[in-house]
Amino acid sequence: MIQLLIYLLVTIVVRTNGHHGLDYVAPAPQALVWQEPLTITRGGTYRGNYRSLDSNVPAVRIRTTQPVTLDGANVYGAGDLIDAKFKNNHLTIVNTHLWAGPQTLNNKRRGKTLDANGTRYLKFEHNYIEHTSGIYLADMQVDDPSIAKHLSIRYNICRNIDGRYRNGGRETAQFVQLNSCGDLKQSEIAWNMAVNEPFVCDTEDFINIFQSWGASMSDALLIHDNFCLGTYPNPPLDPVHSGGGIMLGDGGKGPNSNHNIKCYNNHLLETSQYGIALVRGYNIWWYDNRIVATALTPDGQRVPGFNVGMYCYNDNRSLNGNTYFYNIRVFRNGVCYNTYKYNHQLQSNLFDFSSYVKSQIYFPETGPDANYRLYPGLATAATIAAEKEVWRQKVLASPYTLGPLNE
């Protein structure tokens, strides 16, 4: 009995340290015995090791509307890892390792973790992702009343989201992008951890919500308790970069602008261009987030693309005035964000909200709901280290394990 208790204690410590640490890297896939690419034409649970060495061939293809589960699988590809463009597919992907390898063709980005179109249900939890170009979900608009919960992306570990071509150039790449996903019920992106290193990847946004929305404000799309360290262009010293942390309102016009979204308790470090932003939308709240950036690489080089901690525009104003720009609430966010954009001098740039925007939204500057400077002065390497520790302690105190449960 004593030996069993010691074994369990050691196992818990190893699992906690392995899955919660920011430096966690899954064992390299080379030692696995690989199978050929898999095309799934019937529902069921799949647990193999699937690999494609051709950028034009996904490692796993979903070609059925029956519920499919990948549980404890390993997937490696020179192209997309999981292709789910079969309309009305129903996916559960859990406890799975997903690696994108070097491309075999020019002008091809690294493979998508998941490239899905018309999905009616997705559960993507407790996975490990490395060097992919992210999760892409398009046209997820579910009218099946038997499905109460549409989308769950939780408890994943991700390293180095990468949109580079092998011959130079790049495509935009995000940990998660939703495109034209509407009326999502009981849906959330939560408790994910992404670490993107400068010089080895090219990341646009951590999370990008494009022309997508939750079912209602009482059943909003929830984006919460995520951690992201780094969204760098490659090279990081490139002054032009469109990406950042969490883009809550991107794309869509009028009623199809993003809406019914709540974003809270996220930790965004060194996310270039911005921490959290909105360019159009309505019924969107973001609050209690922590945003910190030094505008430097870890070895001290300036990153000129860093701009501002948070911003909000209304790009629909010329078309619709304020008809589809309302119930925007931005409060209790803590920001300490550096930029070199002005006269190439290091300075703070916390918020970019015009007087017009402030007059149309809830953006308190005093009182208990005020947005605030998270640390005095400029952000430094010590500030970043302190924020990493905040996240580490938060995860250790939570009931959740990040990454695969089967290690």
Image (cartoon, grey):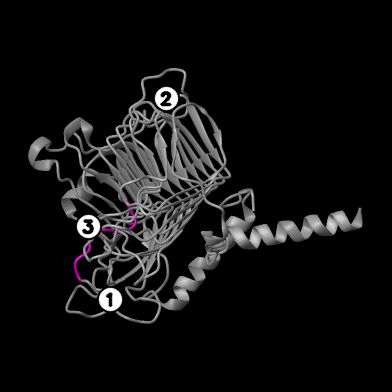
In-front residue for pair 73/371: 73
Q: Secondary structure at mark 1?
A: strand
What's the residue at 24%, 68% (across, down)? 305
> Would residue 287 appear left or right of 345 to someone viewing this image?
right
Give coordinates of residue 186: x percent, y percent: 45, 31
Work out how far the residue at label 2 is from the one at label 1, CA to CA, in angstroms.
Answer: 53 Å
Give coordinates of residue 252: x percent, y percent: 19, 38
Seen as rendered, the residue at the extreme top is: 145
Q: Disc 2 residue type?
A: Thr
Q: Is residue 59 above or below residue 365?
A: above
Q: Quadrant of residue 380?
A: bottom left
Residue at which label 1 appears: 347
> Would residue 294 appear left or right of 19 to someone viewing this image?
left
Q: Secondary structure at mark 3?
A: loop
What's the residue at 33%, 30% (across, down)? 118
Which region of the structure is painted magenta? 239-246
Q: Earlier in the sequence, mark 2 or mark 1?
A: 2
Q: Disc 1 residue type?
A: Gln
Work out how far the residue at label 2 is from the one at label 3, CA to CA, in angstroms.
Answer: 32 Å
In-front residue for pair 66/322: 66
Viewer-nearest of discs 2 and 1 = 2
Q: Is residue 244 magenta?
A: yes
Mark 2 and mark 3 residues within 8 Å of each other at the beta carbon = no
Q: Is residue 393 magenta?
A: no
Q: Secondary structure at mark 2?
A: loop
Report the magenta stretch's main SS.
loop
Residue at which label 3 appears: 107
Residue at which label 2 appears: 65
Q: Disc 3 residue type?
A: Asn
Q: Is residue 148 above or below residue 358?
A: above
Work out how far the residue at label 3 is from the one at label 1, CA to CA, in angstroms.
Answer: 38 Å
